[in-house]
Amino acid sequence: MGVFRRVILPVAWLLVFAIIAVALVKIAFIDGLKSTASQPAPLAEVDIPMVPATRATVTNTVQVKGTVQSNAADPVRSTAAGKVVKVFAEQGATVEKGTPLFQVKAERVATNTQVSKDGTPPKPVYDYLDVLAPSGGTL
């Protein structure tokens, strides 16, 4: 085993590398000396297009197809029964959520239930309530 590792393997490696070196010399020098006049030359040309740089304005046009749908109407109700005394927004106006729409004058019973000295009942008390838009949109 000692002779095999010391003598035979290095000689085998030397032969392999010698064969590779001879093949490379033949490919590089000997085959390169042959005349190539019998082979046709390439006839195609590669032309790189050249575009001159200039200043210009870029315009983008976007077309979008779509439909418009209206949302369901939101009912507007007052929390108290009474008479509408003032209208803040007319029909067709665009409003945001929380915008006052109209004002209601509501009568409530007075807390003082005693009869006055002349025998007349106490005067009614009126509350003025603003009704607000529940959501934004068009009236």
Image: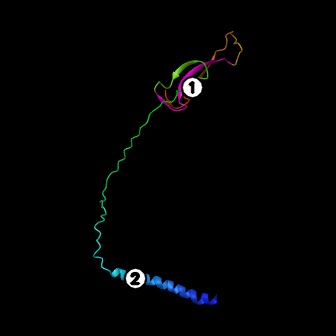
Residue beneath the point at 36% across and 80% down: 31
SS under mark 1: strand
Residue drawn at the location 53% of the way across and 30% of the way down: 99
> In the rendered view, would you say 29 is above or below 76?
below
Which residue bears the numbered disc 1?
Answer: 130
The main secondary structure of the magenta stretch is strand
Task: Give the magenta range.
Answer: 93-110
Mark 1 or 2: in front is: 2
In the rendered image, residue 79, in percent from the top left (x then y), is placed at 61, 23
Residue 81 against residue 71 in the figure, above or below: above
Instruction: Using a 10 Å C-alpha cutoff, classify the residue at mark 1 as few (fewer than 14 neighbours), some (14 to 19) or many (20 or more).
Output: some
Q: Earlier in the sequence, mark 1 or mark 2?
A: 2
Choose between 66 and 60: the one closer to the eye. 66
Residue 89 in picture, x, y percent from top left: 49, 26
Q: Which residue is mark 2?
A: 26
Counting from the top left corner in percent of width and height, residue 66 is at 43, 36
Q: Residue at x 30, y 79 (%)?
A: 35
Residue 103 inside the magenta-drawn segment: yes
Query: In the visual, does 92 lie left or right of 44?
Result: right
Q: Nearer the viewer, residue 34 or 113?
A: 34
Residue positioned 53% across, 20% down in the render:
85
Closer to us: 4 or 137: 4
Label 1 to label 2: alpha-carbon separation? 104 Å
Q: Secondary structure at mark 2?
A: helix
The question of residue 129 being in magenta is answered with no
